[in-house]
Image (cartoon, rainbow, N blue to C red):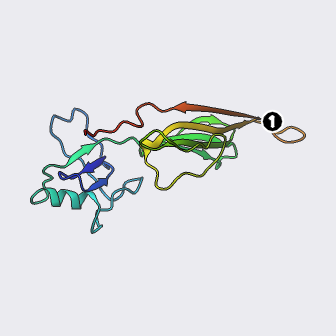
């Protein structure tokens, strides 16, 4: 969850650590304990955490004027622990699920533009430099620079492999909620 203070000047990300029971009513309480799998919750922190925003925005720990927004944390990674390289997908803190086996390489790059539509960085096929700092609303194209899948069994000269590349234009990445 992304929490924003009533003034919009403070933000914190926290993870729910206890799921709601079946049939949870219109009002319920959720926990943000320290034992979250993604290690977002830092309840002992002295600043920039959920506890500080709730205390500053309300009275007696009641978060008045704090907005909560659901976030999806989706991660793809290669798991090489079993001997067969497997592309895995992890959504939030749930159990990872396999997407494809025998994946030898996976790389993404991004083409970025400034707010006036001027190209900042065209990474195309594998360029890895991004201007710093980068904002998600500057990304216009997501390049799957390499998705290399190998054969299951090695041949006499090694594994056979196939490399795929593509680009996706991201919708609404440049949307900005501001009025002039």
Look at 79% across and 37% down and name the residue there.
153
Instruction: Work out whether 77 lies above or below 22.
Output: below
The secondary element bearing badge 1 is classed as: loop
Which quadrant is home to the C terminus?
top left
Q: Position of residue 169 (x, y in %)?
A: 51, 31
Label 1 CA crowd tier, 10 Å (few <14, some 14–19, many 20+):
few
Query: Which of the pair 129/116 is nearer the observer?
Result: 116
Q: Is 70 left, or right, of 128 in this rendering? A: left
Percent across and percent down for residue 141 are 53, 36
**Nearer the observer, 128 or 15:** 128
Q: Which residue is mark 1?
A: 160
Task: State the image quarter where residue 94 is shown.
Answer: top left
Location of residue 53 in the rendering, given as x and y in whole percent from the top left corner: 21, 58
Asked which quadrant contains residue 101, the reply is top right
Q: Left or right: 3 with respect to 162?
A: left
Q: Is residue 141 above or below residue 37?
A: above
Residue at the spot 15% in from the left edge and 53% down from the top edge = 63
| Residue at image location 52% in from the left, 53% down from the top | 131
Q: Residue furthest right?
A: 156
Disc tally is 1
Measuring from the top left, give residue 85's x and y in whole percent: 67, 43
Which residue ends up furthest to the bottom in the rendered image? 46
Q: Is residue 70 left or right of residue 151?
A: left
**Left or right of 165, for residue 174:** left
Residue located 32% across and 50% down the image: 17
Which residue ends up furthest to the left in the rendered image?
59
Query: Within the image, what quadrant is residue 43 found in?
Result: bottom left
């Amino acid at each position: 969850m992304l929490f924003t203070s009533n003034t919009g000047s403070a933000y914190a990300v926290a993870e729910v650590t206890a799921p709601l029971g079946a049939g949870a009513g219109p009002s319920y309480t959720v926990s943000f304990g320290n034992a979250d799998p993604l290690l977002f919750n830092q309840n002992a922190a002295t600043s920039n955490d959920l506890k500080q925003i709730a205390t500053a925005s309300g009275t007696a720990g009641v978060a008045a004027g704090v907005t909560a927004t659901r976030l999806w944390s989706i991660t793809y990674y290669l798991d090489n622990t079993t001997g067969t390289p497997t592309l895995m997908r992890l959504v939030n803190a749930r159990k990872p699920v396999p997407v494809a086996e025998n994946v030898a390489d996976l790389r993404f790059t991004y083409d970025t533009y400034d707010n006036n539509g001027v190209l900042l960085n065209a990474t195309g096929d594998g360029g890895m430099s991004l201007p710093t700092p980068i904002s998600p609303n500057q990304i216009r194209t997501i390049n799957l620079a390499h998705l290399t899948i190998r054969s299951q069994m090695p041949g006499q000269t090694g594994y056979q492999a196939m490399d795929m590349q593509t680009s996706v234009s991201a919708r609404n990445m440049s949307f900005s909620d501001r009025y002039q």
